[in-house]
Amino acid sequence: MSAEDLLRRYLEQRREMGETELVLDGLSVEDVMKLVGIKRGARSAPVERARPLVTESDARGSVGEPASSGWRDALRASGVAPEPPRARDRVRADQAPPPDDDIDADDDDAMPDLVSDAPPPQSTARPPRSAPFAQQVAHEPLIPASPLAPPAAGLVVGSAELSTFPGEIGEATDLVQLAELIKRCTRCDLYRTATNAVPGEGNPHAGFMCVGEAPGAQEDATGRPFYGQAGQLLTKILQAVNLTREEVFILNVLKHRPPGNRNPLPEEVSACRPYLVRQVELVAPKVILALGTFAAQSLLETKLSIGKLRGSVHRYHGIPVIVTYHPAALLRNPAWKRPTWEDVQLARRILDSASA
């Protein structure tokens, strides 16, 4: 497949997902479409649904070809794309923490300096998935660091005062009492097929709250949120901004696992909403990080894509909400680690500002 076809396929899929910025090269999707002569609505050859958006081999070039044959280098050769990041945008080799095969390595909290005047490392090998998150992002090929810009104001949901629900939920005075109510909840039918309820866990007075979609298989088996591979990556993401799981509060919109990990139904979201609102009220975080499309759309009561929700500071009953990709999506699409890193840094700045 030619470099132009790879680029065309990538841009069309990103545009369909609501993306307006080509994160990898700092160009807008529409600008690149015009530069390569792709008109809005034009379609390329069908792409197999099971294939990832752009595979690692696609990004480097076809199998057996050198890395310079990739579509990014072809675009740069035409003079319409920026050059690869300078040495100052890369991580110094002597500052990067050593990779570790253990996904729960103790050195994950060592965040390397992303701005350095030292020459780039000679090796172009990608770090193992177990490397600290900031190190993984810094080694993503051809992803320049984005300059900090004032975030735009986003959607506003509810008033500064949360809704008070009648009955036991509204009368719960702490998270422990509320968790007991969740464990015996029958407000929807999900409890019939679930093994365990997953109320959430963490610091009951956390300034930083993470909200996901719903429990998966391992969460259902353990009763703990973000317990599987995506949860291990979330732990790394938090450590990259000097936060631990014990310091934050982690929960899901739904408290029971949907059968087969299907999408939650509107009535299930409505049934769980009083628990979510009461948890937010009891924790009173300074910032909420919404992980994934469903969590963001449920919190903000919108159908906008994650591409349109990212980069803005939304408000959920007066609390700032930052939207980013779900950790599970990063496992499938490593190119989304850079925008996720930027989102989490923004959430951390809001936390620090509120704390100050």
Image (spheres, rainbow, N blue to C red):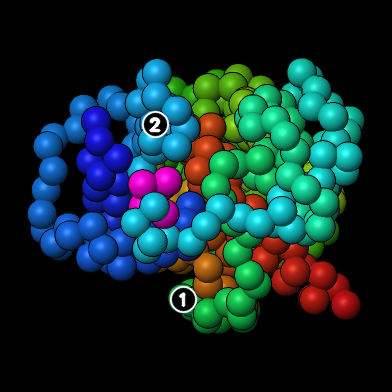
**Residue 112 at what x, y percent from top left?**
82, 47
Q: Which residue is mark 2?
A: 61
Majority SS type along the magenta span: helix
Q: Which mark is residue 111?
A: none
Left or right: 327 as drawn, with respect to 7: right
Q: Nearer the viewer, residue 131 or 225?
A: 131
**Which type of secondary structure does the marked residue at label 2 adopt?**
loop
Tell me: residue 249, above or below residue 201: below
Q: Nearer the viewer, mark 2 or mark 1?
A: 2
Kindly indicate the quadrant of the structure image that contains residue 1. top left
Residue 74 is one of the magenta-drawn residues: yes
Is residue 342 or residue 63 the one in the foreground?
63
Q: Which residue sits at x=84%, y=29%?
A: 98
Residue 36 visible? The answer is yes
Q: Amino acid at mark 1?
A: Leu
Residue 99 belongs to magenta span:
no
**Would residue 284 appear left or right of 46 to someone viewing this image?**
right
CA separation in Å, label 2 and label 1 = 40 Å
Image coords of residue 355 (percent x, y): 85, 73
CB atoms of marks 2 and 1 within 8 Å:
no
Q: Residue at x 64, y 27 (%)?
A: 125
Q: Which residue is mark 1?
A: 155
Q: Which residues are magenta?
A: 72-76
